Image (spheres, grey):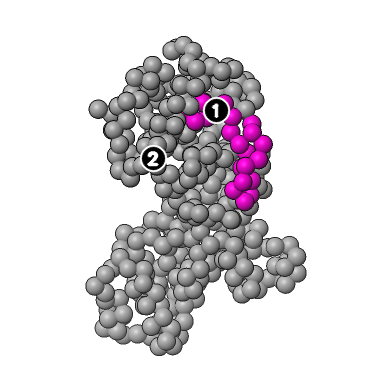
Amino acid sequence: MLEANRNEIHEVYTLCRILGQGFVAMGQADGGTGMNVPVALVERQDYDGKRRFLIEGDNVLAEGRGYFPRQDFVAAADYLLDCLLLSKEETDISRIQPFFDAVGIGDLCATTQDRTHLHIALWHADAPLLGIRIQGRLCGYTPLLSGGRTANLKWEQTGVRFSHPAVHKINATDNPDSVAEVVRRILYIESMGGVFKYADVCDRIFRSNLLMIDTNLPRILAAMVRALHLDNMNRMPDLIAMLEEKNPLKMKSELVSKHGFYGHKVRQFLLAAAWGMRPAKTYDGTPSAISGYVMVDGQGGLLLFTRAEEQTFADYLVAHTKLETGSPDADKYGLLERENGAYFLKLNLRVGFSKR
């Protein structure tokens, strides 16, 4: 019996769909489809080495295995799509295992260390390979930027000094994993005359990564994270509008309104995260192995975004990403903590894809 979870089915579905249809549609900023671009070759890493699939007319050459009709991959993709649409848990897909054995698909998820899922060549098999990362609604999007304690930002609490017993009472909760408790804590402190002033990025590597993108970026993100918690504002377009209204960096109005300063900085951040910047790994601006994304919609349709159309992808990310709240207990944020004689409160930065 071959059982697979939704992530595994989703990834191998995308492989079979590309091979079956022989093209991918270029994505547009609003999520619509653009021009269909032929795919000539798909390469993926399996448990015992690389697998190469060349699309030649109505057939697919699985190297070392022979030729197979593209329609066989269409049938496999249709079957896997039904599994995704009908099941929420692990699914027995033994029915399709003989086909996988024949074409040389061993691992349902590619075994790579560079966070890519596939490599594809567009138009011609000799074209440069694009490292592709797969995202989609059918299995639940993975975060664009994972939270975790390395993605915490911290604010210094000033304005009023609380005694140790008072701090203990403020931090006390029956539900340490509740984001609502974090918000309650902030609002209570501010109601008592406390003021929160942005202080720093908690992790030194993540701080350096953000500063590599822009020296003002930590303060911009801090204003966005505060709005997420206190104003329940999570969509990127709304957060950019908030930044333009409040102008936390006190930039000249012409730079904000005419040049779109804050929107540009948010786009730079989202693109850096998409192309491989992570909180806990040193980022030096060098391009990663990821050079494109295939986005899978709720009906199984595929959209391709590449570095060659980076501005389109940036607009897509703004329209289709949001800030999310992680677990306060697991990510170690939301408590009033003493450090070098002062009190600080941390909030977590996490970026995910919208489900719409």
In the displayed structure, would residue 261 be above or below residue 58?
below
Mark drawn on residue 21:
1
Q: Amino acid at mark 1?
A: Gln
Task: Give the image location of residue 68, x and y in percent.
Answer: 48, 15
Residue at point 65% right, 25% down? 123
Task: Say whether residue 207 is visible.
Answer: no
Left or right for 81, reference 21: left
Place of residue 154 in the rendered image (x, y in percent of width and height, measured from the top left): 44, 68
Start-end of magenta stretch = 15-37
Determine which residue is flagged by label 2. Answer: 84
Give, as a three-letter code, the residue at label 2.
Answer: Leu
Q: Is residue 137 visible?
A: yes
Which one is earlier in the sequence, the residue at label 2 or at label 1?
A: 1
Kindly report the distance in space between the C-alpha atoms of the residues bearing marks 2 and 1. 19 Å
- For the N terminus, the image quarter is top left
Residue 265 image-quadrant placement: bottom right
